[in-house]
Amino acid sequence: MRKIISSTYVTLDGVIEDPQVWTGPFFGDEAAAYNRELLFSSDALLSGRATYDAFAETWPAMEEQTGDFGVRMNTLPHYVVSDSLEKAEWGDSTIIKRADAAAKLAELKEQDGQNILQYGFGAVSRTLIEHGLLDELHLWIHPVIVGPGDTSELLSRDGMGASFELAGTRTFETGVIVAVYRPAGRAA
């Protein structure tokens, strides 16, 4: 069975929005290598509409700069959970309606293959947690406080709660700590 892994950048004050603004000084060779490990141990990408739109706009032009990482980002199958997206044109993309998400994602997990990687944390992540489909949460904790403008920028919002167990950590020279969590009570 495949694992669904969520990889999310977060500040010390819980902000996840606009990571392109605050992650730059902390992204070095170690972070690139870890990110590469995650991507190349996966054979599908999962996202919500906002992440999909941002990636679809950015990644097609990144292959020259990022090499085989960019090629992989652009050629892996993409599953986007959205009720408003009518046509997904980035790579090999499949739209999953929100009402069907839990069942479709459970089916994807049952298929043969590598991990399914989700970047970011939002409504899709909450659906995964609510239905017991999230296997690992990789929180890239950045040593910066940016101050959220509103609660929509925070990791947890809308009264969502869940318990996790620490499965491992990786520390980078830049001060970033990647904490790998699994839902509480779930075996490795």
Image: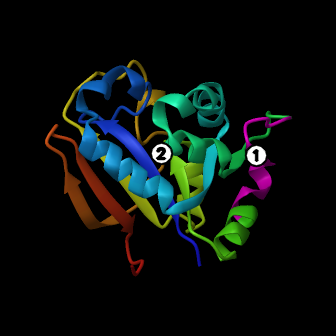
Above or below, 84 against 114 in this view is: above
Name which residue type carries label 2: Gly
Marks 2 and 1 in Cβ contact (< 8 Å): no
Name which residue type carries label 1: Ser
Relative image position of residue 30 (x, y in whole percent): 25, 46
Is residue 93 magenta-colored?
Answer: yes
- Distance between mark 2 and mark 1 Cα atoms: 31 Å
Point out the residue furthest to the right here. Answer: 86
Q: Is residue 101 left or right of residue 169?
A: right
- What is the quadrant of residue 176 in the picture? top left
Which residue bears the numbered disc 2? 159
Above or below, 84 against 57 in this view is: below
Q: Is residue 175 left or right of residue 103?
A: left
Is residue 150 magenta-colored?
Answer: no
Q: Which residue corresponds to the image point at 60% horizontal and 65% vertical from the top-left?
A: 131
Crowding near the residue tagged with mark 2, few <14, some 14–19, many ≥20 C-alpha atoms within 10 Å: few
Q: Which residue corresponds to the image point at 69% horizontal and 75% vertical from the top-left?
A: 111
Relative image position of residue 11 (x, y in whole percent): 28, 34
Q: Nearer the viewer, residue 35 or 53?
A: 35
Q: Nearer the viewer, residue 153 or 86?
A: 86
The local secondary structure at tag 2 comes to loop
Which residue bears the numbered disc 1? 93
Relative image position of residue 123 (x, y in whole percent): 59, 44
Q: Which residue corresponds to the image point at 16% horizontal and 37% vertical from the top-left?
A: 174
Q: Which residues are magenta?
A: 87-102
Above or below, 91 against 162 in this view is: above
